[in-house]
DNA sequence: GAGGGAAAGTACCAATTTCAACTAATTTAA
DNA sequence: TTAAATTAGTTGAAATTGGTACTTTCCCTC
Protein backbone atom coordinates (compact mmCIF):
# COMPACT_ATOMS: atom_id res chain seq x y z
CA UNK A 1 0.00 0.00 0.00
CA UNK A 2 1.33 3.38 -0.89
CA UNK A 3 2.28 5.63 1.94
CA UNK A 4 1.16 9.08 0.85
CA UNK A 5 2.92 12.30 1.65
CA UNK A 6 1.73 14.31 4.62
CA UNK A 7 0.73 17.90 4.04
CA UNK A 8 4.08 19.05 5.39
CA UNK A 9 6.02 16.66 3.25
CA UNK A 10 4.06 17.70 0.24
CA UNK A 11 4.76 21.30 0.95
CA UNK A 12 8.49 20.68 1.28
CA UNK A 13 8.55 18.71 -1.90
CA UNK A 14 6.73 21.39 -3.83
CA UNK A 15 9.00 24.05 -2.43
CA UNK A 16 11.94 22.09 -3.71
CA UNK A 17 10.49 21.96 -7.19
CA UNK A 18 9.51 25.59 -7.18
CA UNK A 19 12.76 26.88 -5.77
CA UNK A 20 14.78 25.02 -8.33
CA UNK A 21 12.59 25.97 -11.23
CA UNK A 22 12.46 29.66 -10.43
CA UNK A 23 16.15 29.87 -9.64
CA UNK A 24 17.18 28.03 -12.74
CA UNK A 25 14.99 30.20 -14.89
CA UNK A 26 16.29 33.34 -13.32
CA UNK A 27 19.92 32.39 -13.78
CA UNK A 28 19.31 31.26 -17.30
CA UNK A 29 17.57 34.46 -18.27
CA UNK A 30 20.39 36.50 -16.78
CA UNK A 31 22.99 34.68 -18.81
CA UNK A 32 20.82 34.71 -21.88
CA UNK A 33 20.03 38.38 -21.88
CA UNK A 34 23.45 39.66 -20.89
CA UNK A 35 25.74 37.17 -22.55
CA UNK A 36 23.65 35.29 -25.07
CA UNK A 37 24.47 32.02 -23.41
CA UNK A 38 22.52 29.34 -21.58
CA UNK A 39 23.30 27.71 -18.26
CA UNK A 40 24.20 24.58 -20.16
CA UNK A 41 26.80 26.50 -22.13
CA UNK A 42 28.11 28.08 -18.99
CA UNK A 43 28.44 24.78 -17.18
CA UNK A 44 30.47 23.34 -19.98
CA UNK A 45 32.77 26.32 -20.12
CA UNK A 46 33.32 26.03 -16.38
CA UNK A 47 34.19 22.36 -16.55
CA UNK A 48 36.59 22.86 -19.38
CA UNK A 49 38.27 25.80 -17.69
CA UNK A 50 38.94 23.73 -14.60
CA UNK A 51 41.00 21.03 -16.25
CA UNK A 52 44.59 20.65 -17.33
CA UNK A 53 44.85 21.68 -20.95
CA UNK A 54 41.30 22.95 -20.84
CA UNK A 55 40.07 19.80 -22.51
CA UNK A 56 37.80 16.95 -21.50
CA UNK A 57 36.68 13.79 -23.16
CA UNK A 58 33.15 14.04 -24.42
CA UNK A 59 31.89 11.20 -22.29
CA UNK A 60 33.40 12.63 -19.14
CA UNK A 61 31.88 15.97 -19.93
CA UNK A 62 28.51 14.36 -20.45
CA UNK A 63 28.72 12.67 -17.12
CA UNK A 64 29.91 15.79 -15.33
CA UNK A 65 27.10 17.90 -16.69
CA UNK A 66 24.47 15.20 -16.30
CA UNK A 67 23.66 15.33 -19.98
CA UNK A 68 23.08 12.45 -22.33
CA UNK A 69 25.79 11.83 -24.88
CA UNK A 70 23.50 12.82 -27.66
CA UNK A 71 22.55 16.05 -26.04
CA UNK A 72 26.12 16.92 -25.27
CA UNK A 73 27.12 16.18 -28.80
CA UNK A 74 24.58 18.61 -30.16
CA UNK A 75 25.44 21.14 -27.51
CA UNK A 76 29.14 21.06 -28.17
CA UNK A 77 28.39 21.22 -31.85
CA UNK A 78 26.54 24.48 -31.34
CA UNK A 79 29.26 25.85 -29.13
CA UNK A 80 31.79 24.90 -31.74
CA UNK A 81 30.01 26.88 -34.42
CA UNK A 82 29.85 29.73 -31.94
CA UNK A 83 33.63 29.45 -31.60
CA UNK A 84 33.61 28.71 -27.88
CA UNK A 85 35.12 25.25 -28.12
CA UNK A 86 36.78 23.00 -30.64
CA UNK A 87 36.97 19.26 -30.89
CA UNK A 88 40.17 17.29 -31.00
CA UNK A 89 40.77 13.65 -31.67
CA UNK A 90 41.92 11.45 -28.87
CA UNK A 91 45.05 9.55 -29.80
CA UNK A 92 44.99 6.98 -27.01
CA UNK A 93 41.47 5.90 -27.82
CA UNK A 94 40.71 6.68 -31.38
CA UNK A 95 36.99 6.38 -30.88
CA UNK A 96 37.09 9.25 -28.50
CA UNK A 97 37.33 12.98 -28.81
CA UNK A 98 38.07 15.95 -26.62
CA UNK A 99 36.15 19.14 -26.25
CA UNK A 100 38.68 21.94 -25.94
CA UNK A 101 38.13 25.44 -24.68
CA UNK A 102 39.12 28.15 -27.14
CA UNK A 103 40.41 31.57 -26.19
CA UNK A 104 37.08 33.00 -27.20
CA UNK A 105 35.40 30.45 -24.95
CA UNK A 106 37.61 31.47 -22.09
CA UNK A 107 36.83 35.12 -22.71
CA UNK A 108 33.15 34.37 -22.80
CA UNK A 109 33.40 32.55 -19.51
CA UNK A 110 35.33 35.35 -17.87
CA UNK A 111 32.75 37.81 -19.08
CA UNK A 112 29.76 35.77 -17.95
CA UNK A 113 31.03 34.51 -14.62
CA UNK A 114 30.31 37.65 -12.59
CA UNK A 115 26.74 37.70 -13.82
CA UNK A 116 26.21 34.09 -12.96
CA UNK A 117 27.91 34.10 -9.59
CA UNK A 118 26.15 37.26 -8.57
CA UNK A 119 22.90 35.65 -9.56
CA UNK A 120 23.58 32.59 -7.47
CA UNK A 121 24.44 34.78 -4.52
CA UNK A 122 21.53 37.11 -4.84
CA UNK A 123 18.90 34.51 -5.45
CA UNK A 124 20.18 31.65 -3.36
CA UNK A 125 23.15 32.08 -1.06
CA UNK A 126 22.32 35.49 0.38
CA UNK A 127 18.70 34.57 0.87
CA UNK A 128 19.68 31.97 3.44
CA UNK A 129 21.72 32.02 6.60
CA UNK A 130 25.03 30.20 6.50
CA UNK A 131 23.62 27.23 8.34
CA UNK A 132 20.47 27.11 6.27
CA UNK A 133 22.49 27.05 3.12
CA UNK A 134 24.72 24.35 4.50
CA UNK A 135 21.69 22.31 5.50
CA UNK A 136 20.37 22.63 1.99
CA UNK A 137 23.67 21.50 0.56
CA UNK A 138 24.02 18.59 2.94
CA UNK A 139 20.54 17.35 2.25
CA UNK A 140 21.13 17.57 -1.48
CA UNK A 141 24.39 15.76 -1.09
CA UNK A 142 22.59 12.84 0.51
CA UNK A 143 19.88 12.83 -2.11
CA UNK A 144 22.52 12.82 -4.80
CA UNK A 145 24.36 9.95 -3.19
CA UNK A 146 21.17 7.95 -2.99
CA UNK A 147 20.28 8.53 -6.61
CA UNK A 148 23.69 8.39 -8.15
CA UNK A 149 24.07 4.68 -8.65
CA UNK A 150 21.18 4.78 -11.04
CA UNK A 151 22.49 5.18 -14.54
CA UNK A 152 19.72 6.33 -16.76
CA UNK A 153 21.82 8.54 -18.93
CA UNK A 154 22.58 5.80 -21.37
CA UNK A 155 21.89 7.23 -24.79
CA UNK B 1 33.73 43.42 -7.66
CA UNK B 2 32.25 40.00 -7.78
CA UNK B 3 32.30 38.01 -4.61
CA UNK B 4 33.05 34.46 -5.72
CA UNK B 5 31.71 31.34 -4.11
CA UNK B 6 33.83 29.59 -1.55
CA UNK B 7 34.65 25.93 -2.11
CA UNK B 8 31.96 24.95 0.36
CA UNK B 9 29.40 27.17 -1.21
CA UNK B 10 30.26 25.88 -4.60
CA UNK B 11 29.87 22.34 -3.38
CA UNK B 12 26.46 23.05 -1.89
CA UNK B 13 25.32 24.74 -5.03
CA UNK B 14 26.43 21.89 -7.23
CA UNK B 15 24.78 19.39 -4.94
CA UNK B 16 21.58 21.28 -5.32
CA UNK B 17 21.78 21.10 -9.08
CA UNK B 18 22.74 17.46 -9.09
CA UNK B 19 20.18 16.36 -6.57
CA UNK B 20 17.39 18.03 -8.43
CA UNK B 21 18.48 16.81 -11.83
CA UNK B 22 18.94 13.20 -10.81
CA UNK B 23 15.75 13.10 -8.82
CA UNK B 24 13.71 14.69 -11.54
CA UNK B 25 15.09 12.32 -14.11
CA UNK B 26 14.43 9.33 -11.95
CA UNK B 27 10.85 10.29 -11.24
CA UNK B 28 10.23 11.12 -14.84
CA UNK B 29 11.60 7.84 -16.07
CA UNK B 30 9.48 5.95 -13.57
CA UNK B 31 6.32 7.63 -14.76
CA UNK B 32 7.35 7.34 -18.35
CA UNK B 33 8.17 3.66 -18.33
CA UNK B 34 5.29 2.50 -16.17
CA UNK B 35 2.54 4.85 -17.16
CA UNK B 36 3.62 6.51 -20.38
CA UNK B 37 3.35 9.92 -18.83
CA UNK B 38 5.74 12.71 -17.95
CA UNK B 39 6.09 14.62 -14.71
CA UNK B 40 4.56 17.59 -16.45
CA UNK B 41 1.50 15.56 -17.31
CA UNK B 42 1.32 14.24 -13.80
CA UNK B 43 1.55 17.68 -12.24
CA UNK B 44 -1.32 18.91 -14.35
CA UNK B 45 -3.48 15.94 -13.48
CA UNK B 46 -2.78 16.53 -9.81
CA UNK B 47 -3.71 20.19 -9.98
CA UNK B 48 -6.91 19.48 -11.82
CA UNK B 49 -7.88 16.70 -9.46
CA UNK B 50 -7.56 19.02 -6.48
CA UNK B 51 -10.11 21.59 -7.58
CA UNK B 52 -13.88 21.89 -7.49
CA UNK B 53 -15.27 20.57 -10.72
CA UNK B 54 -11.83 19.31 -11.70
CA UNK B 55 -11.28 22.29 -13.91
CA UNK B 56 -8.85 25.19 -13.91
CA UNK B 57 -8.41 28.20 -16.09
CA UNK B 58 -5.45 27.83 -18.41
CA UNK B 59 -3.64 30.83 -17.04
CA UNK B 60 -4.00 29.66 -13.45
CA UNK B 61 -2.76 26.27 -14.44
CA UNK B 62 0.22 27.81 -16.16
CA UNK B 63 1.08 29.76 -13.08
CA UNK B 64 0.60 26.81 -10.76
CA UNK B 65 2.84 24.57 -12.81
CA UNK B 66 5.42 27.26 -13.52
CA UNK B 67 4.96 26.82 -17.23
CA UNK B 68 4.74 29.53 -19.85
CA UNK B 69 1.35 29.98 -21.43
CA UNK B 70 2.72 28.76 -24.69
CA UNK B 71 4.11 25.62 -23.20
CA UNK B 72 0.98 24.85 -21.26
CA UNK B 73 -1.11 25.33 -24.36
CA UNK B 74 0.94 22.73 -26.21
CA UNK B 75 0.95 20.44 -23.22
CA UNK B 76 -2.78 20.51 -22.68
CA UNK B 77 -3.26 20.04 -26.40
CA UNK B 78 -1.26 16.83 -26.23
CA UNK B 79 -3.11 15.66 -23.15
CA UNK B 80 -6.37 16.42 -24.88
CA UNK B 81 -5.50 14.18 -27.80
CA UNK B 82 -4.50 11.56 -25.27
CA UNK B 83 -7.95 11.88 -23.76
CA UNK B 84 -6.76 12.93 -20.32
CA UNK B 85 -8.32 16.37 -20.36
CA UNK B 86 -10.76 18.41 -22.37
CA UNK B 87 -11.09 22.13 -22.88
CA UNK B 88 -14.20 24.09 -22.07
CA UNK B 89 -15.06 27.66 -22.77
CA UNK B 90 -15.31 30.06 -19.90
CA UNK B 91 -18.63 31.85 -19.90
CA UNK B 92 -17.73 34.60 -17.46
CA UNK B 93 -14.68 35.64 -19.42
CA UNK B 94 -15.09 34.67 -22.99
CA UNK B 95 -11.42 35.03 -23.74
CA UNK B 96 -10.65 32.28 -21.29
CA UNK B 97 -10.91 28.55 -21.26
CA UNK B 98 -10.80 25.77 -18.74
CA UNK B 99 -8.81 22.62 -18.75
CA UNK B 100 -11.05 19.88 -17.40
CA UNK B 101 -10.04 16.49 -16.11
CA UNK B 102 -11.73 13.60 -17.90
CA UNK B 103 -12.58 10.29 -16.31
CA UNK B 104 -9.72 8.75 -18.21
CA UNK B 105 -7.45 11.46 -16.84
CA UNK B 106 -8.60 10.70 -13.35
CA UNK B 107 -8.00 7.01 -13.88
CA UNK B 108 -4.55 7.70 -15.23
CA UNK B 109 -3.73 9.80 -12.20
CA UNK B 110 -5.00 7.17 -9.79
CA UNK B 111 -2.90 4.59 -11.57
CA UNK B 112 0.25 6.68 -11.63
CA UNK B 113 0.13 8.23 -8.20
CA UNK B 114 1.52 5.27 -6.25
CA UNK B 115 4.49 5.07 -8.58
CA UNK B 116 5.22 8.73 -8.25
CA UNK B 117 4.73 9.05 -4.53
CA UNK B 118 6.77 5.95 -3.88
CA UNK B 119 9.51 7.42 -6.02
CA UNK B 120 9.48 10.67 -4.09
CA UNK B 121 9.71 8.75 -0.84
CA UNK B 122 12.38 6.36 -1.91
CA UNK B 123 14.62 8.87 -3.57
CA UNK B 124 14.06 11.91 -1.43
CA UNK B 125 12.02 11.72 1.75
CA UNK B 126 13.34 8.44 3.11
CA UNK B 127 16.91 9.35 2.29
CA UNK B 128 16.80 12.17 4.81
CA UNK B 129 15.91 12.43 8.45
CA UNK B 130 12.72 14.27 9.29
CA UNK B 131 14.63 17.37 10.31
CA UNK B 132 16.92 17.27 7.31
CA UNK B 133 13.96 17.10 5.00
CA UNK B 134 12.27 19.92 6.82
CA UNK B 135 15.43 21.99 6.58
CA UNK B 136 15.52 21.37 2.86
CA UNK B 137 11.91 22.41 2.53
CA UNK B 138 12.33 25.52 4.63
CA UNK B 139 15.37 26.65 2.71
CA UNK B 140 13.57 26.12 -0.57
CA UNK B 141 10.61 28.01 0.73
CA UNK B 142 12.79 31.02 1.38
CA UNK B 143 14.47 30.77 -1.96
CA UNK B 144 11.10 30.60 -3.62
CA UNK B 145 9.86 33.62 -1.73
CA UNK B 146 12.92 35.57 -2.78
CA UNK B 147 12.54 34.68 -6.43
CA UNK B 148 8.82 34.75 -6.72
CA UNK B 149 8.24 38.42 -7.29
CA UNK B 150 10.14 38.11 -10.51
CA UNK B 151 7.70 37.37 -13.27
CA UNK B 152 9.56 36.04 -16.22
CA UNK B 153 6.89 33.66 -17.33
CA UNK B 154 5.24 36.26 -19.44
CA UNK B 155 4.61 34.63 -22.76
C1' DG C 1 -20.38 54.29 -25.81
C1' DA C 2 -16.01 54.77 -28.28
C1' DG C 3 -11.10 54.30 -28.21
C1' DG C 4 -6.88 52.55 -26.28
C1' DG C 5 -4.57 49.52 -23.58
C1' DA C 6 -4.20 45.10 -21.13
C1' DA C 7 -5.23 40.13 -20.57
C1' DA C 8 -6.28 35.16 -22.20
C1' DG C 9 -5.21 32.03 -25.21
C1' DT C 10 -3.50 30.04 -29.42
C1' DA C 11 -0.51 29.49 -33.51
C1' DC C 12 3.55 29.64 -35.82
C1' DC C 13 8.46 29.31 -36.08
C1' DA C 14 13.03 28.58 -34.21
C1' DA C 15 15.83 26.28 -30.81
C1' DT C 16 16.56 22.52 -27.87
C1' DT C 17 16.08 17.84 -26.29
C1' DT C 18 15.18 13.05 -26.83
C1' DC C 19 15.22 8.65 -29.11
C1' DA C 20 16.95 5.25 -31.96
C1' DA C 21 19.96 3.91 -35.34
C1' DC C 22 24.50 4.01 -36.95
C1' DT C 23 29.91 3.94 -37.54
C1' DA C 24 34.12 2.99 -35.81
C1' DA C 25 37.34 1.52 -32.42
C1' DT C 26 38.27 -1.30 -28.38
C1' DT C 27 37.88 -5.16 -25.37
C1' DT C 28 36.84 -9.84 -24.24
C1' DA C 29 37.05 -14.51 -24.71
C1' DA C 30 37.03 -18.72 -27.07
C1' DT D 1 43.25 -14.17 -34.08
C1' DT D 2 39.00 -13.59 -34.96
C1' DA D 3 34.16 -13.13 -33.78
C1' DA D 4 31.02 -11.12 -30.44
C1' DA D 5 30.08 -7.72 -27.29
C1' DT D 6 30.97 -3.09 -25.45
C1' DT D 7 32.07 1.58 -25.61
C1' DA D 8 32.63 6.43 -27.72
C1' DG D 9 30.61 9.40 -30.26
C1' DT D 10 27.66 11.26 -33.91
C1' DT D 11 23.58 11.76 -36.73
C1' DG D 12 18.85 12.66 -38.22
C1' DA D 13 14.09 12.57 -37.26
C1' DA D 14 10.49 13.34 -33.93
C1' DA D 15 8.94 15.55 -29.81
C1' DT D 16 9.14 19.27 -26.68
C1' DT D 17 10.02 23.98 -25.41
C1' DG D 18 10.43 28.99 -25.92
C1' DG D 19 9.57 33.49 -28.16
C1' DT D 20 6.71 36.35 -30.46
C1' DA D 21 2.94 37.81 -33.10
C1' DC D 22 -1.93 37.64 -33.51
C1' DT D 23 -7.11 37.38 -32.30
C1' DT D 24 -10.59 38.03 -29.25
C1' DT D 25 -12.48 39.89 -25.26
C1' DC D 26 -12.34 42.72 -21.33
C1' DC D 27 -11.51 46.91 -18.67
C1' DC D 28 -10.84 51.72 -18.10
C1' DT D 29 -11.28 56.45 -19.04
C1' DC D 30 -12.93 60.06 -21.37
Image (cartoon, coloured by chain):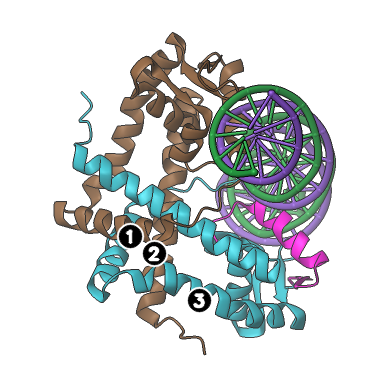
Chain colours: A cyan, B brown, C purple, D green
- Do tags 3 and 2 sit on the same chain? no
Question: Alpha-carbon distance for marks 3 and 2?
Answer: 16 Å
Q: Which mark is residue A54?
A: none
Instruction: Tell me where residue A116 sits by quadrant.
Output: bottom right
Quarter holding the N terminus of chain A is top left
The image position of residue B28, as x and y in percent, is 46, 37
Judging by the rendered image, the residue that carries numbered circle 3 is: A117
Quarter holding the C terminus of chain A is top right
Viewer-closest of B33 and B66: B66
Q: Residue A149: in sight, yes or no? A: no
Of marks 3 and 1, the one in the foreground: 3
The image position of residue A31, as x and y in percent, is 62, 67
Q: Chain of mark 2?
A: B
- Is B20 situated left or right of C24 in this image? left
- Is B94 situated left or right of B127 in this image? right
Secondary structure under badge 3? Answer: helix
> Residue, x 43% and y 74% (percent of image)?
A121
The relative height of residue B9 versus residue A4 in the rendered view (above or below) is below
- Is B28 situated left or right of A45 in this image? left
Q: Residue furthest toward the top?
A: B103
Viewer-closest of A67 and C21: A67
The image position of residue B126, as x and y in percent, is 22, 46
Residue range in magenta is A65-90
Judging by the rendered image, the residue that carries numbered circle 1 is: A140
Neighbor class of circle 2 (other Cα within 10 Å; few <14, some 14-19, many 20+) is many
Viewer-closest of B45 and B95: B95
Question: Alpha-carbon distance for marks 2 and 1?
Answer: 5 Å
Instruction: Tell me where residue A60 sits by quadrant.
Output: bottom right
Q: Chain of mark 1?
A: A
Judging by the rendered image, the residue that carries numbered circle 2 is: B15
The relative height of residue B35 versus residue B16 in the rendered view (above or below) is above
> Residue, x 54% and y 48% (percent of image)?
A153
Amino acid sequence: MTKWLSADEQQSWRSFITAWTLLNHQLNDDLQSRHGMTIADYEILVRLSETEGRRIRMSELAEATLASRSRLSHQVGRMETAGLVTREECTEDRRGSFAVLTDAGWQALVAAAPTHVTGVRTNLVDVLSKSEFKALGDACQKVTAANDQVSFYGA
